[in-house]
Image (cartoon, rainbow, N blue to C red):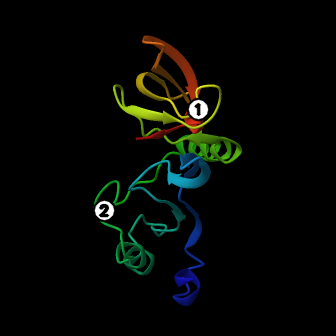
Amino acid sequence: KRIIEEEMGEFIDEILLPMEKVVEVRGGTKKVSQRKLYPGYIFIQMKLYDEEKRLLPTPWDFVRNTQGIIGFLGGERPIATPTEEIAAIKAQITEAEESEKPKVNFEIGEVVKINDGPFQNYNGSVEEIDAEAGKLKVTIDIFGRSTPVELEYWQVEKQ
């Protein structure tokens, strides 16, 4: 909106704020939200220099004075992110849009309550975390014996 209001369209081609979907289960309810892939970074494809490699004041001031912007790669002479890196970031964005990653908010030794499956309503201690698979190994007490069970993130909640 601000780009249109301040007539910056001729300078700014594309803005990337890479996000990924994350799944969190609270109270047995699955909630999908978005999280930044590169917290603190925004990628802007724009015309910032003239033919003689001089900084153009209008787009530079526009971006530099945008609320929330605190610095730039390259400082007062911003540098471009290589095309290959931007292509890799775009590939990450595409991959992130196609999958939902479980939000890792468990710690080893933490007590969790099982909300689903044959051990529903049992409490157990987190022994292992497999962030890639979105699974936990939780030890529960059955008939006085510690028994490890493998569960998906969505099957448990923090105590």
Is residue 92 placed above or below 51 in the rendered structure? above
**Is residue 133 found left or right of 42 in the rendered image?**
right
Q: Who's the residue at 67% across and 41% down the image?
A: 99
Query: Does residue 77 sit above or below 5 in this rendering?
Result: above
**SS class, disc 2:** loop
Q: Quadrant of the N terminus?
A: bottom right
Callout 1 amino acid: Gln
Dot 2 amino acid type: Gly
Q: Number of callouts in the render? A: 2
Q: Position of residue 77 (x, y in %)?
A: 32, 61
Q: Residues within 10 Å of mark 1 (few under 14, many from 20)?
A: few
Q: Quadrant of residue 13?
A: bottom right
Instruction: Measure the C-alpha gap from mark 2 to mark 1.
Output: 49 Å
Q: Sequence order check: which comes first, mark 2 or mark 1?
A: 2
Residue at 53% in and 58% down: 17
**Which residue in the protein does label 2 denote?**
71
Q: Nearer the viewer, mark 2 or mark 1?
A: 1
What x and y, as percent, mark residue 7?
56, 86
**Label 1: which secondary element:** loop
Furthest residue to the right? 98
Numbered circle sitting on residue 22: none
**Splitting the image into 4 quarters, where does residue 76 fall?**
bottom left
- Give the image location of residue 55, x and y in percent: 38, 70
Residue 7, above or below 18: below
74, above or below 53, in the image: above
> In the image, 154: left or right of 39?
right
> Which residue is denoted by mark 1 in the rendering?
120
